[in-house]
């Protein structure tokens, strides 16, 4: 009788989400997870179903994304030297960076202690930013938007920024950073928290833009959050400007 050994691995990825209907496998739509599972299954010659650190929406990008998967009867050295082969099987818009062994109960989603996103917007038409940044036509008050963003750190319940009818037990999140920075011909919004709700970052940016346009006062943002009502917040900005840029775990830097 052959002895079966199963080991768990993490894989670090980056991807351009323009051509994908998000991370998670869905019927009749191509997703990042579908492409990854297919490549891993072909390379390792066994059926593999990965589990990601989160679910990015259609059109959202990731410069750092982790998923875990299990392999049977393979040496660590074989797995850790597999990056070139895996990448040859992945579309050019998805890149595997490294694969490494973890404990059998390690979980890409539930073990993450923090995630960070960046949202890019620019002001002048630029063909090289198509599908990678949001073209905003107008003027925005940078200082007012940063003051409003700082208010986010004072709250925990962000129901007003969440899609309705989601299967979450709580809408509480601990935001540890939220700020805008100026870049050439644009702005980048950075936000970091222990968890995020569905559509949360895009709804936050949409609300900050209302402040920047002068449509609402800075103090109104606090009232919107306290209302816990999604209809009071701003519209979700386009997915093309959103990037998952960092995922933290307690057991590695």
Image (spheres, rainbow, N blue to C red):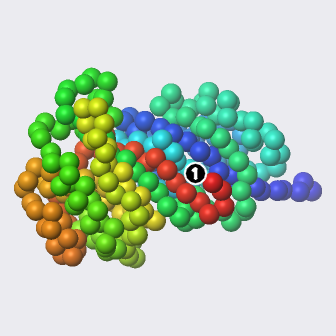
The residue nearer to you, when weighing 49 against 66, is: 66
Q: Which residue is mark 1?
A: 67
Identify the residue at horizontal 58%, vertical 51% (top origin).
Answer: 67
- Is 196 displayed left or right of 1 in the figure? left
What residue is shown at x 46% (from left), y 47% (from top)? 245
Q: Residue at x 13, y 54 (%)?
A: 210
Q: Position of residue 102 (x, y in %)?
A: 71, 56
**Label 1: few (<14), some (14–19) or many (≥20) C-alpha neighbours in 10 Å:** many
Camera sees residue 26: no
The one of 73 and 173 positioned closer to us in this rendering: 173
The quarter of the displayed image where residue 62 is located: top left
Q: Looking at the picture, tell me which residue is in the foreground, 47 or 176.
A: 176
Q: Quadrant of the C terminus?
A: bottom right
Q: Is residue 161 left or right of residue 234?
A: right
Estimate the x, y position of residue 142 in percent, counting from the top left.
20, 48
Camera-side residue of 146 and 175: 146
Q: How many marks?
A: 1
Horizontal and vertical percent position of residue 182: 28, 41
Q: Residue furthest left?
A: 215
**Farthest residue toward the front?**
143
Residue furthest toward the top?
127
Image quarter where the N terminus lies is bottom right
């Amino acid at each position: 009788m052959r002895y079966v050994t199963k080991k768990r691995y993490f894989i670090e990825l980056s991807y351009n989400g323009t051509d994908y209907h998000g991370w998670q496998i869905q019927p009749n739509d191509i997703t990042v997870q579908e492409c990854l599972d297919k490549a891993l299954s072909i390379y390792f010659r066994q059926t593999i179903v990965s589990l990601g650190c989160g679910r990015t929406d259609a059109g959202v990008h990731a410069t750092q994304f982790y998923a875990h998967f299990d392999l049977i009867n393979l040496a660590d050295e074989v797995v850790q030297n597999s990056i070139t082969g895996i990448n040859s099987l992945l579309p050019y818009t998805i890149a595997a960076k490294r694969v490494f062994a973890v404990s059998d109960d390690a979980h890409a989603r539930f073990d993450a202690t923090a995630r960070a996103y960046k949202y890019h917007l620019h002001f002048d038409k630029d063909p090289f930013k198509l599908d990678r940044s949001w073209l905003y036509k107008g003027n925005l008050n940078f200082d007012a938007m940063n003051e409003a963003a700082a208010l986010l750190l004072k709250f925990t319940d962000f129901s007003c920024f969440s899609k309705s009818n989601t299967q979450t037990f709580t809408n509480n999140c601990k935001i540890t950073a939220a700020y805008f920075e100026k870049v050439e011909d644009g702005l980048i919004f950075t936000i970091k928290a222990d968890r995020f709700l569905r559509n949360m970052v895009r709804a936050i940016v949409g609300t900050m833009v209302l402040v920047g346009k002068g449509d609402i006062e800075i103090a109104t943002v606090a009232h919107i959050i306290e209302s816990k009502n999604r209809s009071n917040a701003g519209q979700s900005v386009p997915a093309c400007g959103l990037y998952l840029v960092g995922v933290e775990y307690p057991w590695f830097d």
